[in-house]
Image (cartoon, rainbow, N blue to C red):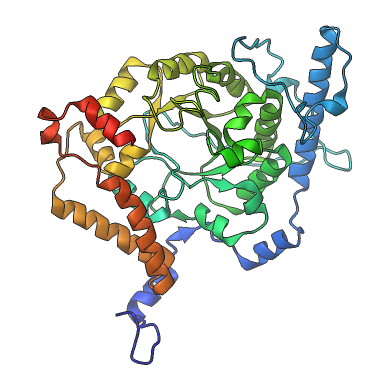
Amino acid sequence: MHISEELKNKINIDLYEKMSTEKTTVNVLEKDLQVKLWKKKYDFSKANDSERQIKRWCQERVAAQERKRGVTPNIDKVSTPGTDKEGDSLNPSQPSVNNGSNSSEHLPTICDTEGGPIKLRSQEKKLIDFSNKLYLAPLTTVGNLPFRRVCKTYGADITCSEMAMATNILQGQMSEWALLKRHKSEDLFGIQICGGWSDTLTRCSQLINDQLEADFVDLNCGCPIDLLYKKGEGCALMGKTNKFEQIIRSMKSVLDIPLTVKMRTGIMDNKSIAHHLVPKLRDWGVSMVTIHGRSREQRYTKSADWDYIDQCAELAKPMPVFGNGDILSYEDLDCHINETEVKGCMIARGALIKPWIFTEIKEQRHWDISSNERFDMIKSFVNNGLEHWGSDQQGVETTRRFLLEWLSFLYRVIIFLTLDIFPLECLKVFHRK
């Protein structure tokens, strides 16, 4: 029992003193910062100046391209919010031409409001070697901090927060900031954000860069949810190259840490466009791209197209490309790493079904985990949840809710010895349900 006879929380004095001095979780929203965001008094001058200059540069470049084609340019129509003119739609049937005009050396000098150059930070921008690392996917709802801690104990190298909306972060919403918390065990941690406008995403990037502890920022361009797609977010960015470029370049200008992108093969089924985008993303300064081998229309059905991921990885060199989709054993990962040009793999449902898949991959063996070991794993998750969400009634209910969410995947685990009876392909179909 956590409640005394006086209906007050019991306190273990020794444990309380130890935990109060030991900081296990970072990226907590402080009250004074929240008030600044509420009152719109946070200084976003760097983000505003960078975004405005890069947006203007992109507009002028598009206008110059239109003049070459003999079309009368109208800069005001380029990237106008809320219209169909906001950037060229990418035609899947025609490959893009990379003539070097996207190179960062042609970018204008970003100036502040008084005409002087913006002072850059003294430290060099951080570089990360993503190659050959096991990446736990940023799983909405189920990829919470307690679950990430479980996966870290089994050998996950890279972890990432759940998808957070940039607008909600800028509004100081406590529920959205809770998604950004980082445990001390997460030694290589990224924050994934989603949005549809360059000004919002640039301000959010500056806020993360200034206030939070993260090793990289990941832009979600693969979310298939209709609500986000209709607002021009998630997968919708893949079809708006001018808008996409403004967002990437603006975010890069305010970040001291790497920027990565997660996307799908395309929007429409059988009309893949990622191979047109990955060379552009490389030229725009993206550090790494993760490609989910399905289109938006496919959602999570059908098999991931690893041949297409391999094609994209070849075009993206030397930028590393991670593949995502249908990795349920160490044989799957070895096959993709050895037979394609990908530099690593992101594991999503495979980690939800059996978090020990990271151990299997590193030790190159099948692990028929015992029921006692699975029970200890669940107890570890519960303890992590009570520590993260609290041990009061609300914390217990929250922990129970997310435990049940996870169990809806965990029950699908099948003992390796049964593979002589059930064909492997049938098991993959079962796991995709």
Q: Quadrant of the C terminus?
A: top left
The spot of residue 215 in percent (x, y) is 51, 43
- Does residue 52 lie above or below 380 as drawn? above
- The foreground one among 266 and 113 is 266
Residue positioned 50% across, 58% down in the render: 26
Residue positioned 60% across, 10% down in the render: 93
The spot of residue 298 in percent (x, y) is 46, 28
Residue positioned 61% across, 59% down in the render: 173
Kindly indicate the quadrant of the structure image that contains residue 112: top right
Give the left or right position of residue 417, taking residue 304 as reference: left
Residue furthest bottom in the image: 6
- The foreground one among 243 and 341 is 243
Q: How many marks?
A: 0
* Residue 329 visible somewhere in the drawing: no
The spot of residue 129 in percent (x, y) is 45, 31
- Does residue 63 lie above or below 56 as drawn? above
Residue positioned 68% across, 19% down in the render: 103
Q: Quadrant of the N terminus?
A: bottom left
- The foreground one among 399 and 151 is 399
* Residue 90 visible somewhere in the drawing: yes
Give the left or right position of residue 63, taking residue 27 as reference: right
- The foreground one among 340 and 309 is 309
Kindly indicate the quadrant of the structure image that contains residue 16: bottom left
The spot of residue 292 in percent (x, y) is 45, 28
